[in-house]
């Protein structure tokens, strides 16, 4: 099993990179695990308290479960990924049955910040985009998909996203094997990742 970690700031284009890699592989050989599924359970908190959680801090992520699940997959076992709701800021009762594949892609803003998780990755990728571009994408996504309003998104960006990015996300670029500038014409870095995958799974 080849495990690829794809990190980068919010709105950097990680999902696009994941899709570009997946498009070249048969469905039966690749699966994706999202860090967003592993936000900690917050049943003990009220909705108001949950809205105040700093979701861009490593403390918000259940890294222990994520590491355990990856190890389970590596051992050939099936796992049940949690399903997280950004509307309620909590895990739902659902889960996604995930089978081991030749290639497992793990994507998320903080995945390179955890040493134990980092050690499980065969290839570490960081997707880089400038902060203006990331803010614009975040605004569009949160308003369209997560029911936020513009003031809420901008406040969160200013108070948590930006400082957390500088403190916890940007420094993890140093751990990356490949840094992909997020540019739709940038096919070279994607081709390098694909070449490594093909070499490993053929």
Image (tube, rainbow, N blue to C red):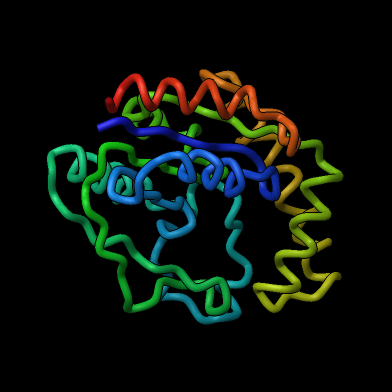
Residue at 58 percent of width and 57 percent of height: 55
Specify whether residue 158 is in view: no
Residue at 61 percent of width and 47 percent of height: 16
Tell me where residue 188 sits by quadrant: top right
Vertical order, 181 against 32 (above or below): above
**Rendering coords of residue 104 (x, y %):** 34, 41
**Rendering coords of residue 190 (x, y %):** 57, 29
Vertical order, 141 against 85 (above or below): above
The quarter of the rendered structure image containing the C terminus is top left
In the image, 183 versus 191, the foreground residue is 191
Give the total number of marks visible in the rendering.
Answer: 0
Residue at 71 percent of width and 52 percent of height: 160
Tell me where residue 39 sits by quadrant: bottom left
**Rendering coords of residue 150 (x, y %):** 84, 70
The quarter of the rendered structure image containing the N terminus is top left
Specify whether residue 136 is in view: yes
Tell me where residue 137 sits by quadrant: bottom right
Question: Would residue 128 be found to the left or right of residue 66 on screen?
Answer: right
Question: Would residue 44 be found to the left or right of residue 65 on screen?
Answer: right
Vertical order, 83 against 22 (above or below): below
**Rendering coords of residue 176 (x, y %):** 54, 22
Question: Would residue 102 be found to the left or right of residue 88 on screen?
Answer: left
């Amino acid at each position: 099993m080849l495990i690829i970690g794809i990190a980068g700031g919010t709105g950097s284009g990680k999902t696009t990179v994941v899709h570009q890699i997946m498009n070249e592989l048969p469905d039966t050989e690749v699966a994706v695990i999202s860090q967003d599924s592993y936000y900690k359970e917050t049943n003990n908190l009220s909705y108001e308290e949950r809205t105040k959680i700093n979701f861009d801090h490593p403390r918000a992520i259940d890294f222990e479960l994520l590491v355990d699940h990856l190890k389970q997959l590596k051992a050939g076992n099936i796992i049940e990924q949690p399903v997280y709701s950004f509307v309620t800021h909590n895990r739902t009762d659902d889960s996604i049955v995930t089978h081991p594949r030749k290639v497992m892609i793990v994507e998320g803003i903080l995945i390179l910040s955890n040493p134990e998780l980092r050690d499980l990755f065969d290839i570490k990728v960081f997707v880089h985009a400038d902060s203006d571009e990331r803010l614009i994408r975040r605004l569009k996504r949160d308003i369209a998909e997560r029911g936020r309003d513009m003031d809420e998104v901008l406040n969160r960006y200013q108070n948590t996203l930006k400082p957390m990015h500088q403190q916890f996300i940007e420094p993890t670029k140093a751990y990356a094997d490949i840094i992909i500038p997020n540019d739709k014409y940038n096919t070279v870095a994607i081709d390098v990742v694909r070449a490594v995958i093909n070499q490993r799974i053929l």
